[in-house]
Image: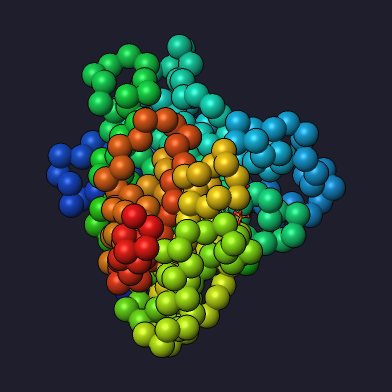
Amino acid sequence: MNMYVAEDPEQIKTIERHILQEQKHHPEAKGILTDLLYDIALAGKVIASKTTRAGLAEILGQTGDVNIQGEVVQKLDRFADMTIYRLNDHTGRLAALGSEEHEGLLHIPDKYPTGKYVLLYDPLDGSNNIDFNIPVGTIFSIYQRVTKSGPGTLLDALQSGRNIVASGYIIYGSSTMLVYTTGKGVHGFTLDPSVGEFLLSHPNIRIPETPVYFSVNLGYRKYWSEGVIRYTDYLQGVDGQIPSLSLRYVGSLVADFHRNLLAGGVFYYPADKKDPHKPHGKLRLLYEAAPLAFLAEQAGGYASDGFGSIMDIQPDDLHQRTPLFIGNSPLVEKAEELIAHHDR
Ligand code: AFP
């Protein structure tokens, strides 16, 4: 026997092999979604190769442009945005793309065929953190188009989370990880940079039942509603109903979500009165909240806007914002209960 052949073929599983095995659960599948997920994983590797060099002078610094959210675009955002678009615009798998960095839909160039899926992505979430060596991430979701043929339209992109076919994120931290779901559990892969492969490291992730953390920007407390303040007191054990949870807030949604997914807890970014132009919270329904809501549900958790499931919200704008409470189901339900009681 060749001593270099692993005895247990399950020992090391690349993301390619894992996605292919998942595809076998769907005999009708033609492999298009599988290929699309490969392309996203490839984009993740390319972006990771830049984020680890972000301290270098040629990358650092802002381009000076302002994106449609009114935020300054940094060079790495632009690189990540372009990488994902370029790796997906010509494959014939997509009808259109939507990026948090662009106001409208991104169309497939006329010279390339269109396909049956729509890819929505936030290329580099938490990009304000790049200069401080704090993790950032890419968030993505995939929907089937609803129009029959031709270039994709807004109708194809403005779908509720219930229609997501696959979603996930790539976190660029002390290591690079890709976490995704196709509705059959949540699986996490860690990039081995020495061989350039994502290897299965966290199969079947479930949010631990006992929460450890709560994550919120406490600096905005004075702008919150009574219900959200009472909820925060509850999480801090002020009323003695639960032992106090530890506070952790990075300010990169992917990093905060990832930690709470693995350790147990809740992240929230409520509506606040800080900016009268953003009374519905800061986070984007399609680019941030819905993809993570699908992951949370698949991991046994729940995501809400404080009134009901994020997954049920029908968007009417690509850049629609929403309050978000996401993590252990009982904790998210508690937020709904206190908001219903104090804020209505
Ligand atoms: P940036 O991409 O502009 O850094 O915003 C990050 C983000 O959308 C999300 O990742 C964080 O959870 C949230 O904003 C942090 O916002 P605050 O700085 O207002 O707490």
Camera sees residue 18: no
Name above or below for residue 310 compared with residue 32: below
Residue 135 image point, x, y percent: 62, 60
From the viewer's side, name the closer residue of 303 and 36.
303
Quarter placement of the C terminus: bottom left
Residue 210 point in image, percent of width and height: 36, 82
- Image quadrant for the N terminus? bottom left
**Quarter of the rendering containing residue 102:** top right
For residue 193, side relative to residue 27 (left or right): right
Residue 68 falls left or right of residue 74 = left
Q: Which residue corresponds to the image point at 46% horizontal and 12% vertical from the top-left?
A: 111
Q: Is residue 334 visible?
A: yes
Q: Is residue 60 above or below residue 198?
A: above
Residue at x 38% of width, y 58% of height: 343
Figure disc tally: 0
Looking at this rendering, what residue extends furthest in the right direction? 57
Report the coloring of the rendering.
Answer: rainbow
Write the residue at 20% across / 50% down: 24
Please state which of residues 165 and 30 is positioned toward the viewer in this rendering.
Answer: 165
Residue beneath the point at 57% across and 57% down: 223
Q: Residue furthest left?
A: 27
Specify the quadrant of the image occupied by residue 312: top left
Find residue 252 and report its image quarter. bottom right
| x and y percentages locating residue 130 in the rendered image | 70, 53
Name the one closer to the observer, 295 or 282: 282
Image height check: is 149 above or below 272? above
Q: Which percent across, then down, holds residue 27?
A: 15, 44
Which residue appears farthest toward the top when viewing the image? 110
